[in-house]
Image: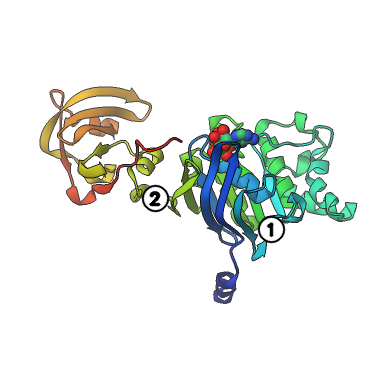
Amino acid sequence: MLQNRRVTASLPPALSVQQLTKHYGPTLAVNNFSLDVQPGETLALLGPSGCGKSTVLRCVAGLERPDSGQIVMAGRDVTYEPPETRGVGMVFQNYALFPHLSVLGNVAYGPRMRRVPRAEAERRAREALDLVDLGELEDRRPDQLSGGQQQRAALARALATGAGLLLLDEPLSNLDEKLRHELRGELKALLAHTRSAALLVTHDQREALAVAGRVAVMRAGQLVQVGKGPELFARPATAWVAAFLGHANIFAGPGGTAQVVPEQALRLGVGDAYRVSAQLLTDSGTEVTLDHPLGPLRLHLSPRESGLIESGQLRLQVDGAGVLQVPDDRGRGKA
Ligand SMILES: Nc1ncnc2c1ncn2[C@@H]1O[C@H](COP(=O)(O)OP(=O)(O)OP(=O)(O)O)[C@@H](O)[C@H]1O
């Protein structure tokens, strides 16, 4: 085990994107973007719509040519190689399964294209289908599968390529919320099992945190912060990152700074009483807004905590040590 770790540590990154820049006409889609994905790691590229995530992925896949920068895979510069020699497995938003092929045919397609003999290609395909629990449906056509099953077939197809790097572009985006929730857990387990490195593109914070070991946050073509999901949430580098990750209480301060007040910094039922200016029932409790000197303070109360509201007021103490001071970059730029 120890020895394995040492070997892994000495391997080059599965993917190293170095100073990547890409325009579409006048639009600067990716701006001097650098990122490493380690062998076996799942990294989520997270950012709002239009920030350039898919463009990074398409450059890595070889479907777009960068204006400048390098794409290096396991130590090999592939910047100018065509997609088919890069050795990546891909899953796109719309799955892109071939409608006329069976599930087995779809999954065996990758190895077949690489001239693997049919019997061996089908053996690998069946192995991948078993991994995603679709072994019994191999004879069906894609239109005879549910959305979740199609998604798993697309994953199996990427896995069957045996690639050391998987590229997943919003792989759960076509599914309803309940199924997405279920498949997030499955996807994480599956990626851990395959030991391939994976770059997952998503605009969904929960998905990034649930599936990936590390999360890279992207804004307007640039990388703004990268780290383990819980650490990013606990220590966002800027007010924009805090807001994007879902922090509710961010208050502009002097000199271009902002204060982020995480829920852990709030103690309820002690200290001064503040007026509750708004109250909204949710499925898991109550969303309230307090008139606080810092600004309108929003918090989520469990049904038991809601009992602490007396005569329209709630006692609350803010633990100053838990409040984060960050640069306020929320007004800057787009996406
Ligand atoms: N083929 C293209 N031609 C012109 N502009 C493009 C093209 N593809 C993307 N863009 C622009 O480049 C920018 C980045 O797009 P990209 O698709 O990479 O963003 P994204 O973060 O993946 O967005 P989404 O989450 O909505 O898929 C956007 O401004 C987009 O309009």
Taking the view exactly as shown, the residue that stands out farthest to the left is: 272
Drawn side of residue 56 relative to residue 272, left or right? right
Residue found at x 67% / y 34%: 94
Ligand 1 rendered quadrant: top right
Q: Name the spot of residue 31 as percent of width and height, x first.
A: 51, 47
Label at residue 232: 2
| Badge 1 vs badge 2, beta-carbon distance below 8 Å | no
Drawn side of residue 46 relative to residue 81, left or right? left
Is residue 31 in sight in this rendering?
yes
**Badge 1 local density, few (<14 within 10 Å), some, or many (20+)?**
some
Label at residue 78: 1
Q: Amino acid at mark 1?
A: Val
Q: Name the spot of residue 207 as percent of width and height, x first.
A: 51, 41
Image quadrant where residue 72 sits: bottom right
Q: Name the spot of residue 284 as percent of width and height, x first.
A: 36, 30
Q: Amino acid at mark 2?
A: Leu
Nearest to N terminus: mark 1 or mark 2: 1
